[in-house]
Image: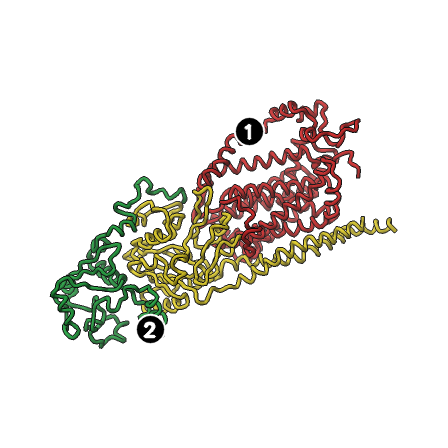
Amino acid sequence: MKRLNRRSFLKGGLASGVTAAAVTGSVGKADAAGDFGGYPDSMGVLVDLTKCIGCRTCEAACNKEQNLPAPDKPFTDMSVHDEVRHGGLPRRTSEKAYTVVNKYEVEGREHPLFRKVQCNHCQEPGCLTSCFVNAYTKTPEGAVIYDPKVCVGCRTCMIACPFYIPAYSYSSPINPVVKKCIMCYDTRLKFGRPPACVEACPQQVMTFGKRKDLIDLAHKTIKSRPSLYLDHVYGEKEVGGTSWMYLTSQDAPFGEIGFDTHLGKQPIINYVKEFLAIVPMVLTIWPALFTGFHLLATRKEAKKNDESVS
Amino acid sequence: MGIKKRKLLGLALMAAMVSPWSLPGPATAEVFELDSVKNLYEGVSFDHDMHIEITGEDCTACHHHTAGTAPVDPLCVTCHANSPEADDPSCKSCHAKDVFDADNMKKNWDTPLLHHRNKPGLKAAYHRNCLGCHEEIGAPTGCTDCHAMTEVGEKFYNTGKYAPEPTAAGQGGGHH
Amino acid sequence: MKTYVTQGFEPIDTLKKPGSDTPWTLKEKLLLGLSSGEYVKQLVRNPFNWILAIIYAVGIPIILGRFYYGLGWVTHSSYDYPWGLFLGWGLFCMVPLSASGFMLGTTVELFGRKDFKPIERLGLLNGLLGYFFAVMFLQADLGQPWRLIYPMFVSLGPAAVLFLVAWHVATYLTVQVAELVPAASEMMGWKAPKKFVKSIVLGLTVAGIILSTLHQGALGALFTYAPGKVHPLWYSYSFQWFHFFCSSIFAGLSMLIVVSTLSKWFLKWRCDADFLGSLDRITLGLSKGASLALITYLIIKLTAVAHDNEWGLLFTGWGQWYIFELSFGVILPLILYTVAIRNQSVAVARFAALIAVLGILLNRLNTALITFNWNLYQEIPHWREIVITVTIYATYILVYRAVLYRLPILYTWKGESK
C-alpha cells in the first residue's frame, strides 16, 4: 500500500508538473506583456471638441470607408442627436456604425457641445489583453486591429473595454464577429494617411500626428487659450493612455459630456495582474504543499503498512 | 483641398495678374466661386463685397494679419502687430488644400519651432472662419444654406435619392 | 421506479445475473433490468418527466432557432451587456456549485478521510456534470461555438484570464472523467482502467486542486477586467479571485448536501445502505467544512470593503442590496450551519445548504448581471434566453438522474473481484 502511494505520488507530481510547465510559460509572457507602454512613434488623433459642429460627416465617411451597411437614417438627419436608447443614454457604436457623434446640452453653455465616439485605440488595450485567442493587435502605427478569423465570440473584449466600444454582429448566425473602429488601418493608416473621419471633417476637429507630438500640441493649445480650454487632455493618461485624445471647453468638463472620468491611469491589465501573479505560485507550490499534506494526513496508515510489510 | 479662388469675371482675373504690388485696402467688387474643395457639395458663391460691408471693412475679421490691418487677438499681436500685408492674402496661399498629404504632414510636424503647427487646411479654414461668424450674427449655418449638395454628396450622406427606406428607421438591430 | 421497487424489483447492481454465470447485457444494464415496455411505463408514470417534456417542447425549437437565426434572435443583442444568462447562470453559477468534485477528492484521497468515501463519487459526479454543462452553456453563448478549440490549438492568447479558464476547465474535465472511470469500469466489468486510475489517483487529485484553485479564481478575475462596470462593492482587484475561490468551497459542499438530500428523497431505491446510513453523519461533516469556508469568505468580503474603504457605499441603495446578499447568502447559512453542527441537526444543515446555494447564485448573478453596468441601466434577459437556460439546465438534471440510475454512485457495485 505504501509503495503504491509513493509511486502515485511521483506520478502525481509529474502530472501536475506538466500542467504547471504548460501554463507557467504563458503566465511569464503575461507579465512581460503587462508593462508595454505603447510604441514610441505610434500615431494618434487629437480631437478638439470645442470645434465640432455635429454635422455627422465623419460618420458618413466611416460608413463608406469601412463598407458598413446603409444607415437607418440619412447622415444629414440631425434628429439622431436627440435619440435616446435604453437607460436614457445617447447613441453608441454599433455593428453598423464604428463612430457616432452625440450632442450634449451642458448647463451654463449657450451652445451644445458635440462629442465624437469611436475606439480610442488604447496603448494597452483591455480588449487585447483579455482576448484568449489573440484576435487583437496593437500595431506600431497605433491602431488596435482585430482578426475576425480567429474570434470565438466570447465577447470578453466587450466586457473589458472601459469605453464600451466593441459591438458584435449578433444578427449573423454563421459568422458573428466583433465590429469596431480599426483607425482605417488597412486602407489608410498603414500608408501614413489619417483615418477617413479625420480627413472628412469640415472643421478639422481632429489633428492627426504622432501621439507624442499631439500631447505637446494639446498642452500648447490649452496654454494658448487657458480661458477656453479645460486643462486636461483626456486620453493622455486615462487607462494607460490612448491614441485618441480629447480637448474640451472649460464650461463643458469631460464628465458632463459622456466621458468616464473615473477610469484611473492604470491600464486595464494592471487590475488583473494581482491574479496573474498568483498563478505561477499556485502551480509551483500547490503540488508540493498538498502532497505534503497527504503524507502527513496518512502517516499513521503508512506506518501501519510499513510494520505489516516488515 | 487647396484654396483656389477662381475669379469669375475676366476683369477680376486681369486685376489679379497685376495685383502683387497693387491693391492696398479692400479688393474690388467681386463675387468669388469658392470651389477648390468642392466634391460632396458644390462650390460657394462668395460675395466678397458684401462681407467687407458686413465686417465694417475690418479685414482682420477673416484675414488675420495678412490684409495689412493689425490683428486684435493678443495671441496674434505678439508676433504680428506690425506684419505687412501679404503678397497674396487669399486663404489658399496659407491654408493648404491637401493638408493631410505626406509633404504637408512632414512640413507640419518636422519643422522645428514651427508655431502654427496646427494650422487648418483650406476646407477647415473656410468652415471655421465662416461658421464662427455666421453663428454669431445669425447668418445661415446649415450646410446647404451655402452650398448645394452634389450627387456624390447624396450618395456619401445616404440622402436624397440615396436615402434609406423610411421603414428601416429606428431599427438599430434590436440592441439597446 | 419506486413502484417497481416496492413491488419487489431489484435494479441491476452486479455483473452477472443472480444465481447464474451469464453476464447482463449492456442493454439490460442500461434498462436497469427492466424490459423496454416496463421502462417506458415508469418513464410515463413519473410526473417529473412530464415537466421535462413540456420544457423540451418549448425549449428545443428555440435552441434550434438560436443556431439558425443567431444570437440576436434569442437575446437582446446587447453591446453593453455582452454576457447574459448563459454565462451569468451557466458558467458563473454552475462552476462554483460544481466545486464538490475537487473538495471531496481532496478530502478522501488526499487527507485520507475515508469516512467521506460513501459520498465521494457523488461529489465527483456533481463536479463533472456541472462543468460539462457549464461548457454546454458556453457553447450556447459563444458566437462561433465550433471554434471552441481555437484557444487551445489555433490562436493562443496566453496572457488572458479566459485562456486560463479554457485550459483549466478542459484539463479538469478530463481529470474528472478519469476520476469517475472506476465507477464506469465496475459497471462494465473492465479491470485495467480502474486499476490504472487508482494508481494515479493522487496525481489526479492534486491536479484537481491546482486547476480548481486557478479556474474558480480565474472566473472571479475575469471581472477584474471591468473595474468601472462591476459595482465597487462586488469588485476587488486584490481579492476578486479569492472571493470566487473561497465561496466555491462552501458552494460545492452545500450543493453536494442538496444533491445528496434530493437523491435520498427521490432516488432512495438506488441508494444502498452504506450511503443512506452514513449520509447524516457525512452531511454534518460537510457542514463543518462549509461553515469554515463561509466564515473565511465573510471575513475576506469585509476585508475587501475595508481595503478599498467602501464603507460609505453600504448606505446607498446598492449597499443595502450588498448587505442583503451578505446577510442572506453568507451570514444566515453560517448561523444555520453552526446551529446544525451544535445540535447535530441534519435537517437544519440541509436547510442551511439550500440557503448557501441560493446565496451563491445571488452573488454570481449580482456580479455578472445585476450590478454589472450599475451606473448605466439594468437589463432583463430576453424570454428566449430564459427558455434556453431552463432547457439546458433541465438537460443537466436529466443526465444527472440517468447517470445516478445506472453508475454505482449512490450504491456499491456488488460481486466485483478486487
Residue B140 visible in the shown view: yes
Q: Quadrant of residue B174?
A: top left
Q: Residue at x 65, y 56 (%)?
A: A20
The 10 Å Cα crowd at callout 2, few under 14, some 14 to 19, many 20 or more, is few
The reply to the same-chain question for discs 1 and 2 is no
Left or right, A142 with reference to B158:
right
**In the picture shown, does residue A155 fall above or below A109?**
above
Specify the colour of chain C: red
Give the CA separation, mark 1 to mark 2. 78 Å
Residue A163 point in image, percent of width and height: 43, 54
The 10 Å Cα crowd at callout 1, few under 14, some 14 to 19, many 20 or more, is few
Left or right, C79 with reference to C35:
left
Specify the colour of chain A: yellow
Mark sitting on residue B114: 2
Specify the colour of chain B: green
Left or right, A240 with reference to C247:
left
Mark sitting on residue C53: 1
Q: Amino acid at mark 2?
A: Leu
Q: Residue at x 24, y 59 (%)?
A: B131
Q: Amino acid at mark 1?
A: Ala
